[in-house]
Image (cartoon, helix red, strand yellow):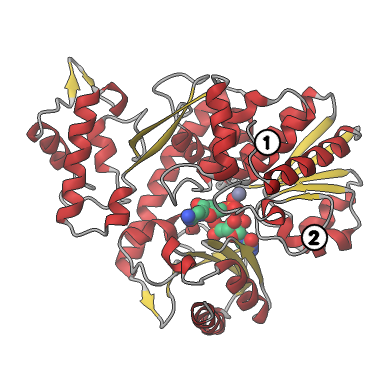
C-alpha cells in the first residue's frame, strides 16, 4: 500500500505490533458494536483469526458499560475489541483484561494495546473507521487483502464518505488498493439508495435525503417525471433499475434532479452531495443488496440494530442462503421503521433551544435507530444547530446527537459535549465530533439539555 506520511507509517507500525500480539493467542473473544461498521469489523477480525487457526467467537454489544465489560472479563479469555473500547479504557483497565483494541472513537486515554487513528493524528470520523482500522491489523496478520470489501462497507456504513462525497485519507488508500487488486470498483455516480435493487421510480419515491419536492413519497409523480424527461421506466415487462439505464440517461436524470434541488433553494453544499463516489463489490452479484457498499451497509444495519447480529455476521462471513434471505426481510422492516420515524418527527416537531434542537421519541422509535433518524432529519431541520434525539431504553433514556460538518468546523464536538453533559446527570456518552450518543437516567432530560446547551455555547465561542 502506498504510504505517504509519517503518521501513516506510525499507524502501520502499531497495526503490525497488535497483529503480532494477536497471533500469539490460542483463543480470542471478539467484542464489537451493533452497527454496520461493527459487524464488518467483527467479521474481518473473525476471518483473520479463522485463517490463522485461532479459535474465536464474536460478541455484539450496544455499548461498553461496566456490566458488559465485567461479563466479558469473566470469560477469562483474550479480548479483541473492534469498533469500540477506546472510549471506555478506564472500564477495561479496571476489569483486568488481556486485550487489544482496533477502534476509531475518540480515545479516553493512551494504551500500547490500542490501534486508534486519533493516536496518530488521523481523523477517526473520516479517514479510518472501525472496519478499516481492523483491516489494517488484519493485513498484518496474513494475506487478508480480499477482506477489503468488508472494510470499505464498514467505512461507508459510518458515513465516512459523506464529507467529500468520497472516501479520504487512509480509507482512500485502502479502497484504492482494493480497486487495484480487483476486489472493488469506484466511480462517480448518483448517491441515492437502491441503485442496484430498486426500480428507478421506487428509488426516487423513497429518496428523502435530500427531500425532492414533488417527487419524494409520490409514486405517480416519479413515473411522470421519468416519462417527462424521456426515460422509459420499463423495459418490456420489467421495471428498470438505475444500473439498467444508459450513461446518457443517467446524466440526463441527474441533471434534472439537480434542477429540482436548485429550484427548491437547497444550499449548494447539499446539492453537490447528490453525486459522489460509489463503491462496487466485484465479488457480489449485480442487482443485489451486497453489490454496492452503501446498500450492503444498510442491510447490515437492518440486522444487528434489531437484535439479529448473527444474521449480519453470517452474511459477511459468506452465507448467501438463509442468513441473506433473513437479512433482506429485515431490511424491508428497517426501511419502514426509518420512514415511520421520520413521519413521527414531522408530526411531533423539533423543539429549538439556543444552541441545539431536540425531539423525544419515547418508545415510538427504537433506541438503536433513533440516531439514524436524527441524522436524516437534517434534510428538513435547521442546519445551524445539532439535533439531539431521545428514546426510551430499558428504563433509561438513550440520547443520539448529530451535527453537520459546518457546525464541527465552528467548534462543535458532540462526543465531548455528550460525555460531559451525560456524566453531569449520572449517565455516560461519547462517539465522534459529528455524531455521538449517550445513556442517561430517565427523567433527567431537561437537566441534560440545559447542560448540553451550555457546553455547546462554549464550544462555538472558544474557536
Ligand atoms: O459507533 P460508530 O462510530 O460506528 O457510529 C458512527 C455513527 O455516526 C453512525 O451511526 C453514522 O451514521 C454517524 N455519522 C453521521 N454523520 C457523519 C458521520 C457519521 O451521522 N457525517
Ligand atoms: O447510537 P448512535 O448511532 O447515536 O451513536 C453515535 C455514536 O456515538 C457512535 O459512534 C456510538 O458508538 C457513540 N456512542 C457512545 N456512547 C454511547 C452511545 C453512543 O460512544 N453511550
Ligand atoms: Zn464505527
Q: Is mark 1 within 8 Å of ligand 3?
A: no
- Tag 1 residue: 135
Residue 110 in the image: above or below residue 74: below
Contact flag, marks 2 and 1 (Cβ < 8 Å): no
Asked if residue 153 can be seen in this view, the reply is yes
> Considering depth in this image, is 410 or 101 the residue closer to the camera?
410
For disc 2, the neighbor class at 10 Å (few under 14, some 14 to 19, many from 20) is few
Q: Is mark 2 within 8 Å of ligand 2?
A: no
> Considering depth in this image, is 348 or 216 the residue closer to the camera?
216
Secondary structure under badge 1?
A: helix
- Disc number placed over residue 110 in the picture, else none: 2
Residue drawn at (32%, 58%), measured in percent from left and top?
A: 379
Q: Position of residue 49 (x, y in %)?
A: 79, 30
For disc 1, the neighbor class at 10 Å (few under 14, some 14 to 19, many from 20) is many
Task: Say which quadrant the N terminus sits in.
Answer: top right
Question: What is the distance, in whole Å, between disc 2 and disc 1 at their CAs?
Answer: 21 Å
Asked if residue 369 can be seen in this view, the reply is no
Q: Position of residue 33 (x, y in %)?
A: 65, 48
Secondary structure under badge 2?
A: loop
Amino acid at each position: 500500500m502506498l504510504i505517504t506520511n509519517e503518521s501513516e507509517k506510525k499507524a502501520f507500525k502499531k497495526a503490525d505490533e497488535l497483529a503480532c500480539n494477536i497471533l500469539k493467542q490460542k483463543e480470542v473473544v471478539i467484542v464489537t458494536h451493533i452497527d454496520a461498521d461493527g459487524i464488518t469489523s467483527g467479521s474481518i477480525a473473525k476471518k483473520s483469526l479463522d485463517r490463522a487457526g485461532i479459535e474465536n467467537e464474536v460478541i455484539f454489544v450496544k455499548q461498553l458499560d461496566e456490566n458488559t465489560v465485567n461479563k466479558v472479563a469473566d470469560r477469562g479469555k483474550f479480548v479483541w475489541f473492534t469498533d469500540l473500547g477506546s472510549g471506555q479504557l478506564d472500564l477495561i483497565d479496571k476489569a483486568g483484561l488481556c486485550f487489544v483494541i482496533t477502534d476509531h472513537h475518540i480515545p479516553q486515554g493512551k494504551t500500547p494495546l490500542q490501534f486508534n487513528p486519533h493516536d496518530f493524528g488521523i481523523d477517526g470520523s473520516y479517514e479510518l473507521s472501525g472496519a478499516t482500522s481492523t483491516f489494517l491489523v488484519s493485513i498484518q496478520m496474513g494475506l487478508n487483502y480480499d477482506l477489503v470489501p468488508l472494510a470499505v462497507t464498514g467505512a461507508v456504513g459510518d458515513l465516512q464518505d459523506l464529507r467529500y462525497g468520497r472516501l479520504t485519507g487512509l480509507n482512500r488508500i485502502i479502497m484504492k488498493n482494493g480497486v487495484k487488486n480487483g476486489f472493488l470498483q469506484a466511480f462517480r455516480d448518483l448517491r441515492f439508495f437502491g441503485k442496484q435493487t430498486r426500480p428507478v421510480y421506487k428509488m426516487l419515491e423513497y429518496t428523502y435525503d435530500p427531500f425532492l419536492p414533488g417527487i419524494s413519497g409520490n409514486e405517480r409523480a416519479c413515473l411522470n417525471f421519468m416519462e417527462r424527461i424521456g426515460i422509459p421506466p420499463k423495459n418490456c415487462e420489467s421495471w428498470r433499475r438505475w444500473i439498467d439505464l444508459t450513461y446518457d440517461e443517467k446524466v440526463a436524470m441527474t441533471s434534472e434532479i439537480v434542477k429540482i434541488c436548485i429550484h427548491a433553494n437547497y444550499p449548494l453544499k447539499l446539492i453537490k452531495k447528490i453525486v459522489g463516489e460509489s463503491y462496487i463489490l466485484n465479488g457480489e452479484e449485480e442487482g443485489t443488496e451486497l453489490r454496492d457498499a452503501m446498500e450492503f451497509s444498510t442491510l447490515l444495519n437492518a440486522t444487528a440494530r434489531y437484535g439479529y447480529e448473527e444474521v449480519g455476521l453470517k452474511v459477511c462471513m459468506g452465507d448467501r442462503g438463509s442468513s441473506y434471505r433473513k437479512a433482506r426481510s429485515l431490511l424491508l422492516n428497517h426501511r419502514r421503521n426509518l420512514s415511520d420515524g421520520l413521519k413521527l418527527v414531522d408530526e411531533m416537531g423539533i423543539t429549538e433551544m439556543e444552541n441545539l434542537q431536540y425531539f423525544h421519541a419515547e418508545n415510538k422509535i427504537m433506541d438503536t435507530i433513533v440516531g439514524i433518524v436524527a441524522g436524516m432529519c437534517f434534510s428538513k431541520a435547521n442546519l445551524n444547530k445539532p439535533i439531539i434525539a431521545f428514546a426510551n431504553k430499558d428504563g433509561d433514556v438513550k440520547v443520539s446527537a448529530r451535527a453537520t460538518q459546518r457546525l464541527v468546523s465552528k467548534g462543535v464536538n458532540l462526543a465531548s459535549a455528550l460525555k460531559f453533559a451525560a456524566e453531569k446527570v449520572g449517565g455516560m456518552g461519547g462517539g465522534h465530533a459529528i455524531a455521538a450518543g449517550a445513556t442517561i437516567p430517565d427523567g433527567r432530560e431537561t437537566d441534560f439539555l440545559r447542560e448540553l446547551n451550555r457546553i455547546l455555547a462554549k464550544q462555538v465561542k472558544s474557536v
